C-alpha cells in the first residue's frame, strides 16, 4: 500500500505541475456553474409564477435543482475524464520511462492502482467545486442533504469506472491525443448504449441498455442507493484495471 500511495502522490504532483489540472478545473467550474445558475433561475422563476397564480405549492429543491445539476455534471465527466487519463501511461511511453517503470521492483498492480487513485482524487477534487455551488442552497433553502450525498457517490463511482477504462486505453498508445480521443469515444458509447431501448426490446438491446452508465446513474441522481448499480460500477472498475494489468504485463515482458 505504501508504494501505491507514493505513486499516487507522484501522479498528483505531475498533474498540478502542468496546466492539465488547472485547465480541467477551470473548464468544469465554468460549465457546472452555468448549469447551477440556470437550474436555480428556473426554480426561482417557477416559484414566483406559482405564487402569482395563487397556487402556493411547495417546490422540491432537490428535484428542481440538485438532480438536474448532478445529471449535467455527469455529462461534463465525458469530457473531463479523457483529459485526466490520457497522460497516465501514454506520457510514460512517449518519454521512454515506461521501461524503467516496467522493470522496477514495484508490482504492476501497485503502479496501476497508484495512477488510477491519483486520477480519481483529481476527479473528486473537481467534483468538490460543484459541491460549493450546492452549499449555497443550504444558505437560502433547506434541501435534503441525503439524496445529494447519494448523487455525489454515484458520480464518484461512475467516474471511477470511466477512469479505469481510460487508464487501460492509455497503456495502448504513446500518443496522448489518441488516448484522449479513444477514451472519449469509449465513454460516449457507454453513455448512449441505452438509446437502443427506445426502439428495440430484444435481449441484445436489454444487454446494451444495462451496460449504459446512464442507466445506473439515474437512481443515484434521484437519491436512491441501489446495490446493483454500485456493483455494476465496481465491476467496470475491476474489468478496466484488470485489462490494464494485462497490458502492463505485456509491456514488462517486452521491456
Image: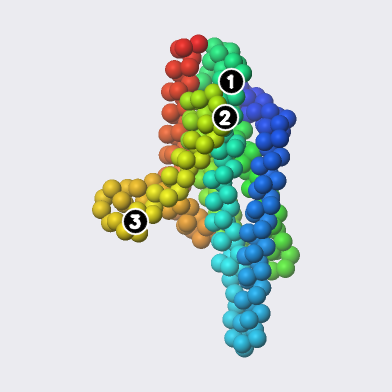
In the picture of the structure, the residue carrying the numbered disc 2 is: 176
- Confirm whether residue 125 shows in the render: no
- Mark 3 secondary-structure assignment: helix
Counting residues from the start of the chain, the first of labels 3 and 1 encountered is 1
Q: Residue at x 52, y 29 (%)?
A: 170
Looking at the image, do the residues carrying marks 1 and 2 touch, with CB atoms under 8 Å apart? yes
Look at mark 1 in the image and give the residue it sits on: 94
Q: Nearer the viewer, residue 133 or 174?
A: 174
For disc 2, the neighbor class at 10 Å (few under 14, some 14 to 19, many from 20) is many
Residue 56 horizontal/vertical position (percent): 62, 84
From mark 2 to mark 3, how far is it between C-alphas? Answer: 34 Å
Res. 58 in view: yes
Residue at position x 43%, y 23% from top? 246
Mark 3 surroundings within 10 Å by alpha-carbon count, few (fewer than 14), some (14 through 19), many (20 or more): some
Determine whether the residue tagged by mark 2 lies in a helix, strand or loop: helix
Which quadrant holds residue 133? bottom right
Circle 1: element type: helix
84, above or below 201, in the image = above
Per the model, the C-alpha gap separating discs 3 and 1 is: 41 Å
Q: Horizontal and vertical percent for residue 105?
A: 56, 13
Decide: marks 2, 3 in contact (CB < 8 A)?
no
The numbered dot on residue 197 is 3
Residue beneath the point at 50% across and 55% down: 220
Is 136 left or right of 92, judged from the image as shown?
right
Amino acid at each position: 500500500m505504501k508504494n501505491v500511495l507514493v505513486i499516487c502522490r507522484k501522479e498528483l504532483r505531475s498533474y498540478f505541475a502542468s496546466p492539465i489540472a488547472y485547465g480541467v478545473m477551470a473548464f468544469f467550474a465554468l460549465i457546472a456553474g452555468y448549469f447551477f445558475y440556470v437550474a436555480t433561475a428556473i426554480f426561482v422563476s417557477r416559484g414566483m409564477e406559482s405564487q402569482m397564480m395563487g397556487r402556493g405549492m411547495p417546490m422540491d429543491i432537490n428535484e428542481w435543482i440538485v438532480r438536474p445539476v448532478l445529471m449535467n455534471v455527469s455529462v461534463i465527466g465525458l469530457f473531463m475524464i479523457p483529459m485526466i487519463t490520457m497522460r497516465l501511461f501514454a506520457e510514460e511511453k512517449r518519454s521512454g520511462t515506461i521501461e524503467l517503470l516496467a522493470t522496477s521492483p514495484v508490482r504492476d498492480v501497485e503502479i496501476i492502482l497508484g495512477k488510477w487513485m491519483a486520477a480519481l482524487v483529481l476527479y473528486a477534487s473537481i467534483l468538490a467545486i460543484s459541491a460549493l455551488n450546492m452549499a449555497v442552497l443550504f444558505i437560502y433553502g433547506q434541501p435534503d442533504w441525503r439524496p445529494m450525498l447519494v448523487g455525489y457517490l454515484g458520480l464518484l463511482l461512475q467516474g471511477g469506472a470511466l477512469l479505469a477504462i481510460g487508464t487501460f486505453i492509455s497503456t495502448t498508445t504513446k500518443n496522448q491525443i489518441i488516448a484522449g480521443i479513444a477514451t472519449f469515444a469509449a465513454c460516449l458509447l457507454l453513455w448512449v448504449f441505452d438509446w437502443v431501448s427506445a426502439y428495440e426490446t430484444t435481449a441484445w438491446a436489454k444487454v446494451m441498455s444495462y451496460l449504459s452508465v446512464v442507466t445506473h446513474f439515474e437512481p443515484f441522481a434521484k437519491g436512491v442507493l441501489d446495490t446493483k448499480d454500485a456493483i455494476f460500477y465496481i465491476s467496470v472498475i475491476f474489468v478496466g484495471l484488470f485489462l490494464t494489468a494485462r497490458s502492463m504485463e505485456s509491456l514488462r515482458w517486452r521491456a
